[in-house]
């Protein structure tokens, strides 16, 4: 799913074994951006509504900002990160074991 190969930015090499797997990189990036997005949209809500702000409204803005920015950041990591190229996913991302 990585766009790096389509854009010619990839040489198709497998990365070093100590590199972070794509799934963990996406999860960490999404977590960081969810906190930042929630805070940023909460501030934008406070600026937009001023004295007419209510708690449910500010929580709604913060939650939408957190979900939107985390999803966008994870998608961009998946599309443009060298760790998320197919050969690196096959080499380093292990499916999680779920007992029956």
Image (cartoon, rainbow, N blue to C red):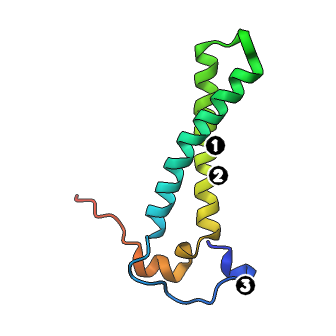
Residue 86 sits in quarter: bottom right
Which of pointers 2 and 3 lies earlier in the amino acid sequence?
3
- Whether 90 is drawn above or below 98: the answer is below
Which of pointers 1 and 3 lies earlier in the amino acid sequence?
3
Point out residue 40 in the picture as x, y percentages from the top left corner.
Answer: 65, 35
**21 sits left or right of 72 in the view:** left
Point out residue 5 in the picture as x, y percentages from the top left corner.
Answer: 67, 82
**94 sits left or right of 76 in the view:** left
Classify mark 2: residues with Cα within 10 Å, few (<14), some (14-19) or many (20+): some
Residue in the image at 47% along x and 56% along y: 27
Which image quarter holds the C terminus? bottom left
- Whether 30 is drawn above or below 17: the answer is above
In the picture, the disc for residue 72 is 2
The residue lying furthest to the top in this view is 51
In the picture, the disc for residue 53 is none
| Label 2 with label 1: CB-CB less than 8 Å | yes
Point out residue 81 in the picture as x, y percentages from the top left corner.
Answer: 59, 71
Distance of label 2 from label 3 (alpha carbons): 23 Å
Distance of label 1 from label 3 (alpha carbons): 29 Å
**Residue bearing the label numbered 3:** 8
**Residue bearing the label numbered 1:** 68
**64 sits left or right of 21 in the view:** right
Residue in the image at 49% along x and 87% along y: 14
């Amino acid at each position: 799913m990585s766009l790096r190969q389509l854009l010619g930015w990839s040489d198709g090499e497998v990365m070093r074994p100590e590199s972070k797997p794509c799934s963990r990189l996406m999860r960490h990036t999404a977590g960081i951006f969810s906190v930042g997005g929630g805070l940023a949209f909460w501030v934008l809500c406070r600026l937009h509504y001023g004295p007419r702000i209510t708690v449910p409204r500010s929580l709604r803005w913060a939650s939408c900002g957190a979900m939107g920015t985390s999803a966008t950041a994870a998608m961009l990591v998946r599309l443009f990160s060298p760790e998320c190229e197919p050969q690196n996913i096959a080499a380093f991302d292990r499916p999680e074991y779920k007992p029956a």
